[in-house]
Image (cartoon, rainbow, N blue to C red):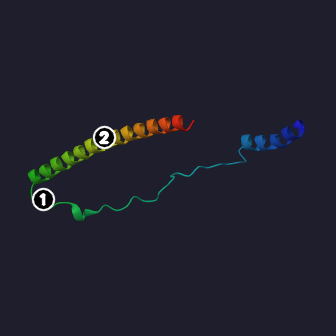
Amino acid sequence: MRCRGLLLGLPVLLAGLAGCVNVKAPERIVLNGDPPPVDARRVPETTSHEDCRDELIRAYQNIQYLERENARLKQRADEYKRERDEARKRLKRYED
């Protein structure tokens, strides 16, 4: 049984070593297709380089605010999960 598997695998191995079997990977693998187009309707109109800098500063401030808010909400969610787990443990103790 083991010998038969070896005899069947040997020709495949030899063909691969001889170059008869060619496995070519694709040059580019696309998982989700092309990225969605950028929605430029919300981009503010600017007239000078200073206006652009001001808008960029406001955008970075908004990003920082959203990151802080996200961290705060994550902390609250973790706290609620802890409270839920504690309540489940207490309930289980009362049920037993």
| Side of 25 where 80 appears, left or right | left
| Side of 53 where 9 appears, left or right | right
Please state, as top left, top right, bottom left or bottom right, where the N terminus lies in the image: top right
Residue type, numbered disc 1? Thr
Instruction: Report x, y in % for residue 60.
Output: 21, 46
Badge 2 crowding class, 10 Å Cα cut-off, few under 14, some 14 to 19, many 20 or more, is few
Per the rendering, the mark at residue 71 is 2
Q: Residue at x 10, y 53 (%)?
A: 51
| Relative to 32, residue 96 above or below | above
Residue nearer the viewer, 53 or 85: 85
Residue type, numbered disc 2? Ala
For label 1, the SS is: loop
Residue nearer the viewer, 63 or 73: 73
| Relative to 53, residue 47 above or below | below
Please state, as top left, top right, bottom left or bottom right, where the C terminus lies in the image: top right
Residue matched to label 1: 46
Between disc 1 and disc 2, the foreground one is 2
